[in-house]
Image (cartoon, rainbow, N blue to C red):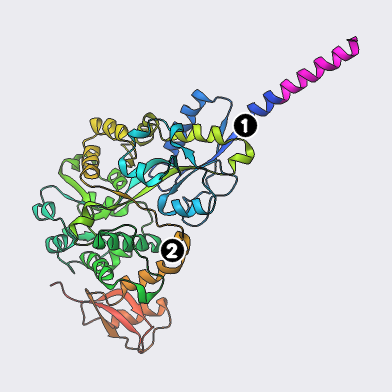
Amino acid sequence: MTAVRRIRLISFTIFTLLFISTAYAQQTLTVGLYPDVPRIEQFKSVIEAEWAKIEPNVSITWDDSWGGGYEANPPSTLDVYVFDTLYLTYFDTQGLLHHIPKSKIDDYDDFLDYAKTGVSTGDDILGVPQLGCTTVLFYRSDDQPMANATTLDDVVKALNTCTYYPEAPPANVGLMADFSNESANAGYYIQSLQCDKNQWPVSLPYSESEVDQTVIGYIKQVIAMSSFKNALYEAPISYQRGTWFGENHGRAYIGYSESSSTIPEDQYDNISVKVMPWANNTGGIASPLFYSDVIGVHTGTQSRGTTDLAIKLANLMASSDVLVQCLDSYEGKGPQYLIPARNSSFQTLSASYPMYQKIYSMVQSSTPIMFDIGPNARDWFDTMQKQLTIDYKADPPCYTDVPATTGYIPDNAAAQGICPDTCASDNGWSGQWTNIVSPSVCGCQVPSQ
């Protein structure tokens, strides 16, 4: 071999090694976290630190535009994304989820049973379980009627209806519940329908004529235990109703487990939790729907050659140690009180935080079902969420419609000047009005019963 050829070969080898080394050093995974958590920065910090220990040459790029799947499908630029399982089957049918063999999932048997069942498809899974969530009924432990309440009727009998009208209730009076979000409102309908029928999946309505009026009646009962102003209040801060409960407003409230983080810790001893009963069928109440957040690996990773790394990162993000670190106390603040999808994570957190033990006991006392709407999830929400919200608000039991003094209300600004006078002799204006009927009507408050 001539000297020139040797030099060329050495130069080519060095160039190739440098190219491979540079490409590997610059490799990154693009990740979208589920956004609706108390402290998303804690998730980022923990995951980055733990990932650097095992893959120091593969960085993480966070896609903060990812919204969890509610408004848009995951873009092909994402390698890993955490999403609400309302869209699990939908994303799968759209070809957006790489099927992961169960044999590649670390400590698979440690996941809660409903999570394993919900993501399984034969020998594969559609996503790695990370968090769970359901509508939780918070009440004070010394409130015996509430402690004994099992069905929705029991809760109504304990709390009564039409007990207050402001945004925030007086001390130890009424229920607080959030109906300000149309997407969540549609979810409540399905939860109530599943609870009433004690079956899953359920037949979903696609028109007003198909809506189950019994279920609408259940939802209206819940709103009647609250107030229109509280139920429709779109809070400027997260978990406002939990904050109010911690300030002694209301007798109970419906929220998610993580809203515990807004309540002073010295109150935890006298706070109890149970899964909200959305109907009266005890079988359905015992098997509630659980929203879940799972970690998906995008099928786009196959063309980029990042599938194996993405699975490795998904495993890390769902590992017991990382989950505990993500949910634990952080920078002087208490736990996030999100529901982990692993028994071992729950057990570790429960050993340090009694409130976590209460939440874990609540989960263990039922047989949850993963909340997955099916292959038409996006279309169903787009079709029905607004209509169901209208149904909930129609003919409220705690208010009475009074014809407007002007005969017609053109818009909300005009209602502000018309309805207070219209309702002056009817215990005041509720804040509701409509011009769908003629003459327009104002929603006037009726006295507590």
Q: Give the left or right position of residue 65, taking residue 420 as reference.
A: right
Q: Position of residue 53 (x, y in %)?
A: 49, 23
Q: Which stretch appears magenta?
A: 1-19
Quadrant in which the N terminus appears: top right
On the question of residue 184 being in view, the answer is yes
Identify the residue at image location x=34%, y=39%. Answer: 341
3D distance between C-alphas at marks 1 and 2: 38 Å
Q: Position of residue 157 (x, y in %)?
A: 12, 63
Majority secondary structure of the magenta segment? helix
Q: Which mark is residue 27?
A: 1
Element at badge 2? helix
Badge 1 amino acid: Gln
Element at badge 1? loop
Query: Residue 182's quadrant in the figure?
Result: bottom left
**Dot 2: few (<14), some (14–19), or many (≥20) neighbours within 10 Å?**
some
Residue 327 to residue 132: above or below:
above
Identify the residue at image location x=68%, y=29%. Answer: 23
Q: Is residue 5 magenta?
A: yes
Identify the residue at image location x=44%, y=35%. Answer: 317
For disc 2, the marked residue is: 381
Q: Position of residue 363 (x, y in %)?
A: 25, 44
